[in-house]
Image (cartoon, helix red, strand yellow):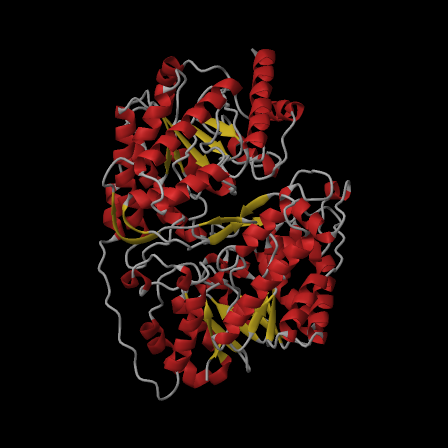
């Protein structure tokens, strides 16, 4: 019969045990042995969950102390030169130095660059290659985990990132493909070691097969896998996900591997095509359970579609999730407050294992047909796009800019922050007390007002030019709005990893979205009453709320996005009416939601950019609209960024050594509106020196006109502490003043 397995499992622990252990170790509250024990316990629980669900193979190697790509960089000796100075005392601390720029041992250093993993909200650490890169193999951690799982009685399937995807993800050389001949011997050695460790199957992830690959990259697959197939004593399962294979289908199907996995959620129409293209006794693994959403799988649909393949392939048909379950919460049974009616519609990672088991049984020859689910009709996407066709503000940016400068009279190189300030332990405790009914709403609101007043006081002392209220009332930039809007389900433990120890709890879009009342106005209005300086109103944009929520699957994403945009437009208008004249509408997930195939880009931008403009299309010209974007490859979306028509955009750029600015320099005049590239990295605990920041401001002035440049950190400051924030912002403000005086 059909077999079951998964590509990977969440590594945070059912109650974020790993996060707590990581952060305790970084703070010196536990030693390394305690951290290692916490990781071992999480791995054991993950493996046991797979075994208990009857999976034929237990996936090993998907665990990471920070990031799976960083695991591979250390395994292949890809360690930038700057980390060799002041190295840590041990391998794990050196690992954390690469990830965070700081560890319990070793000198502080600039952390590795970080960006989004394909079209997800997971961030990976970018491999930094050098010309003539020397690759060496150190697979001790992976072999140790294989042995650990085997000793616990598991039939292991190690998972590794394929050589071509690994090279594609990196930077630092003109053509990373030139490094393939030097990297392949490490993969040969690794596969030999895994075979010697009695791994019957090895999963090799090559998700770039779902991209529009240049011809030379496509051609490299045949050569690389011919080499790997000869070296491997284990069977190889080639895993693709996140996108249809399309023109790469024949290529992938013909590679000398023993099986291929496809994302049937994203490419249901390719299941039969791949099955027909496979030769010999190759395995076909179909990802039918959505690894990126929380709704229960329509098992009846897949039972009917897969029955012919189950008869044809027998145990060569494998059932799996579409991708690693890294992108799903861990266990629905930890949700004690959700009503049963809601829980019955949901499946977290552990429940997805049970779904695979149920589908396996439903594909047996004598299994009865499962009842079909009801379907929901939605309006055509063409109607949605028509509604978004004319959403430009009445005045062009050049006209608005003069009006805004006259209103605000800001200095050159105005300083600001992205929005959030540290969420202290006291604030989290007060929020928990309010949530559990231990304090009244009035007491809670009084505490929030005190936090806002303190944030305003600190900013005025620091000398920032445009202030923020600090977002003390918000647990998360998306979850908060999901709690204020109708149409969302809110969970207590639906955590997923964003990066390192940072976890987010996406709300679930369960119905039509609307705004029952104002969401942010009272906090912004109160903050503005405390100062004569402008205070930004802070909103999360419609595209980001959509992309950082678990979406509905019964209507187009564009329709949900427009519903969110309607609600946010009401909020923007209320903020403006309350006297808030600078409003920031964050869209860090604009690039993340972009389909991986270029042929689908324009349709996405039509509704995504249209929804952003819709939220602010009715404001007065003197109201300044800001937006913020996170780690992205901006080059490919510059037209869309310009089309947002925001007056000011802030971007994360410090970890890229300001390389991202090349996209904004462009040809001729470059990016037309005002811009604030982050001049220091908030994801590292390191405090930037004033001299370093002055140098960075001058770097920015090489590509951005003085009158259009803003000075700000990379991102929100929620995850930092006040000691780090105060010193960093003081140095940032003084750097801006220094340059301002020198260029005036």
Closer to the camera in the image, 76 or 533: 533
- The picture quadrant where one finds residue 225 is bottom right
User: Residue at horizontal 61%, vertical 12%?
Assistant: 742
Give how far across and how far down residue 14 sits, in percent: 48, 60
Q: Residue lying farthest front?
A: 438
Judged from this view, the residue extending furthest toward the bottom is 366
Seen at 60% across and 20% down, the residue is 735
- State left or right for residue 500 relative to residue 195: left
Where 199 falls versus 598 (above or below)? below
- Judge whether residue 297 can be spotted in this image: yes
Tell whether 533 sits left or right of 383. Answer: right
In the image, taking residue 659 as reference, residue 320 lies left or right, namely left
- Quarter of the image for residue 337 reads bottom left
Query: Residue 664: x, y in percent?
Result: 51, 32
- Which corner quadrant holds the C terminus? top right
Query: Depth check: 322 or 486 in front?
Result: 486
Count of numbered labels shown in the rendering: 0
Task: Name the foreground residue: 463 vs 454.
Answer: 454
Observer-nearest residue: 55 or 650?
55
534 shown above or below 73: above
Residue 421 is situated, as x and y percent measured from the top left of the image, at 48, 32
Tell me where residue 182 appears, x and y as whole percent.
Answer: 74, 58
Query: Which residue is at 57% across, 39% downward?
Result: 683
Q: Is residue 62 visible?
A: no
In this rendering, the answer to whether 242 lies above or below 575 is: below
């Amino acid at each position: 019969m059909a077999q079951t397995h998964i590509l990977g499992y969440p590594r945070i622990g059912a109650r974020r045990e790993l996060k707590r252990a990581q952060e305790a170790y970084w703070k010196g509250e536990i030693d390394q042995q305690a951290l290692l024990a916490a990781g071992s316990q999480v791995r054991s629980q993950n493996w046991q969950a797979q075994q208990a669900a009857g999976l034929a193979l237990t996936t090993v190697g998907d665990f990471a102390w920070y990031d799976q790509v960083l695991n591979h960089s250390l395994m292949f000796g890809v360690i930038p030169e700057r980390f060799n100075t002041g190295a840590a005392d041990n391998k794990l601390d050196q690992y954390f130095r690469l990830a965070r720029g700081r560890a319990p041992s070793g000198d502080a250093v600039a952390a590795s660059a970080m960006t989004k993993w394909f079209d997800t909200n997971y961030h990976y650490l970018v491999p930094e290659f050098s010309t003539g890169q020397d690759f060496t193999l150190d697979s001790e951690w992976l072999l140790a985990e294989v042995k650990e799982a085997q000793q616990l009685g598991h039939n292991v399937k190690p998972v590794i990132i394929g050589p071509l995807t690994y090279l594609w993800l990196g930077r630092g050389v003109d053509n990373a493909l030139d490094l393939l001949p030097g990297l392949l011997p490490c993969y040969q050695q690794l596969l030999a070691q895994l075979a010697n460790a009695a791994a019957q199957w090895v999963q090799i992830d090559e998700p770039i097969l779902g991209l529009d690959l240049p011809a030379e990259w496509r051609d490299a697959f045949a050569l690389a896998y011919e080499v790997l197939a000869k070296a491997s004593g284990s069977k190889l399962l080639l895993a693709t996900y996140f996108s249809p294979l399309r023109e790469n289908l024949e290529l992938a199907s013909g590679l000398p591997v023993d099986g291929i996995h496809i994302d049937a959620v994203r490419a249901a129409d390719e299941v039969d095509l791949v099955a027909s293209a496979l030769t010999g006794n190759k395995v076909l693994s179909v990802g039918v359970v959505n690894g990126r959403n929380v709704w229960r799988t329509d098992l009846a649909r897949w039972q009917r579609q897969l029955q012919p393949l189950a008869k044809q392939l027998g145990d060569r048909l494998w059932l799996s999730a579409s991708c690693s379950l890294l992108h799903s919460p861990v266990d629905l049974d930890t949700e004690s407050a959700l009503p049963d009616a809601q829980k019955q519609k949901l499946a977290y990672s552990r429940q997805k294992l049970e779904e695979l088991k149920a589908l396996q049984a439903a594909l047996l020859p004598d299994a009865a047909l499962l009842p079909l689910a009801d379907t929901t009709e939605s309006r055509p996407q063409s109607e949605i796009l028509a509604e978004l066709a004319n959403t430009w503000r009445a005045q062009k940016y050049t006209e608005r800019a003069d009006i805004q400068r006259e209103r605000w009279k800001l200095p050159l190189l105005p300083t600001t922050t992205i929005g959030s300030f540290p969420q202290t332990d006291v604030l989290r405790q007060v929020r928990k007390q309010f949530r559990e009914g231990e304090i009244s709403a009035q007491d809670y609101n009084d505490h929030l007002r005190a936090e806002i007043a303190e944030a305003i006081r600190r900013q005025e002392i620091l000398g920032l030019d445009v202030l923020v209220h600090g977002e003390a009332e918000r647990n998360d930039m998306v979850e908060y709005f999901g709690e204020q809007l109708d149409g969302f389900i809110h969970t207590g433990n639906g955590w997923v990893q964003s990066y390192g120890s940072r976890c987010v709890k996406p709300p679930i879009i369960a119905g039509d979205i609307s705004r029952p009342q104002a969401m942010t106005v009272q906090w912004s209005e109160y903050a503005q009453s405390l100062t004569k300086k402008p205070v930004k109103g802070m909103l999360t944009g419609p595209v980001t709320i959509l992309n950082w929520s678990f979406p509905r699957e019964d209507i187009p994403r564009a329709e949900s996005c427009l519903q969110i945009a309607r609600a946010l437009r009401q909020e923007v208008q209320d903020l403006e009416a309350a006297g808030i004249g600078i409003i920031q509408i964050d869209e860090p997930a604009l690039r993340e939601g972009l389909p991986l195939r270029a042929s689908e880009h324009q349709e996405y931008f039509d509704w995504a950019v249209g929804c952003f403009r819709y939220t602010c299309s009715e404001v007065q010209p003197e109201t300044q609209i800001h937006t913020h974007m996170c780690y992205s490859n901006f080059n490919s979306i510059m037209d869309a960024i310009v089309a947002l028509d925001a007056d000011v955009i802030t971007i994360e750029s410090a970890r890229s050594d300001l390389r991202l600015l090349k996209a904004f320099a462009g040809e001729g005049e470059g990016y037309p509106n005002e811009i604030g590239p982050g001049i220091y990295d908030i994801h590292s605990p390191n405090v930037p020196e004033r001299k370093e920041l002055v140098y960075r401001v001058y770097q920015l002035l090489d590509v951005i006109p003085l009158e259009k440049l803003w000075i700000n950190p990379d991102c929100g400051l929620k995850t930092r502490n006040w000691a780090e924030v105060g010193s960093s912002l003081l140095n940032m403000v003084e750097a801006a003043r220094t340059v301002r005086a020198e260029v005036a």
